Amino acid sequence: MTNEYSSLLDEIPHLLRAKAFADSLSATPLFSRVGTKLDDHDRELATLYGQNLGFSHVFPARLLHLSEAIGAAEANDYDPEAWECEEQLRASLHAQALLQTSEEGAAALLQLVASEVSQIAKDVAEDTFSHSPHINEAAINCIIGHVAQAAHCMALAILSNTDVVDPDHPFVLRWSLFNRGRWPVGIVGSSYNLY
């Protein structure tokens, strides 16, 4: 019983930080800078993301319009190499998270993040892009999917304490770009497309 209680106490800080992340999602300035000029910090984050994912040949590319972002998102879905690298990182972080927290605790927090971020992303995307002729249900779902995936991976980084130990982890960097109002669409060829 003592060991079980001790384990529970050990996981509480990670769960509390993940809960704080879920609570902060409504304050994330999603899409507030899409289409604008990339600043030095945007470029630095995007370059580090590519390098730390293992794609040192990839450089940030600015997308100007929603139609470009949707097209790049569709192309990104067919880039198996980048997807495989991200999937391996996600699986690794999930395993590390379970060393820090119980499976039940991690699952509850990940579900909380998923439910929070999906509604927030939907509301903000509909509001931000309402005047675009390229916005439709499929585009909204694509945008929600990208934000939800990034938030899920950031939550794993928090639950595993990776965001503290490795602040330049690709998933931390990607969420930082969302948190700066960008949409980091993904890698296609030698470009890391940012809207």
Image (cartoon, rainbow, N blue to C red):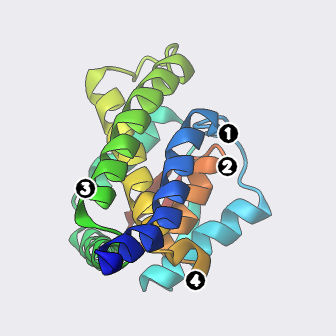
Q: Earlier in the sequence, mark 4 or mark 1?
A: 1
191 up-or-down from 126: above or below: below
Q: Amino acid at mark 4?
A: Val
Q: Earlier in the sequence, mark 2 or mark 1?
A: 1
Determine the residue positioned at 42% across, 86% down.
54
Q: Which residue is mark 3?
A: 77
175 up-or-down from 63: above or below: below
Q: Amino acid at mark 1?
A: Arg
Q: Which residue is mark 1?
A: 33
In three-dimensional space, the C-alpha distance between marks 4 and 3, rounded to whole angstroms, equals 30 Å
Q: Are marks 2 and 1 in contact (CB under 8 Å)?
A: yes
Quadrant in which the N terminus appears: bottom left
Q: Amino acid at mark 3?
A: Asp
Q: Are marks 4 and 2 in contact (CB under 8 Å)?
A: no
* In this rendering, the label closer to the viewer, 4 or 2: 4
Determine the residue positioned at 69% across, 71% down.
44
Classify mark 2: helix, strand or loop.
loop
Determine the residue positioned at 62% across, 40% down.
28
Callout 2 crowding tier (Cα within 10 Å): few <14, some 14–19, many ≥20: some
Q: Are marks 3 and 2 in contact (CB under 8 Å)?
A: no
Determine the residue positioned at 40% across, 27% down.
119
Q: Which residue is mark 4?
A: 165
In three-dimensional space, the C-alpha distance between marks 4 and 2, rounded to whole angstroms, equals 22 Å
Q: Which residue is mark 2?
A: 180
Q: Earlier in the sequence, mark 3 or mark 2?
A: 3
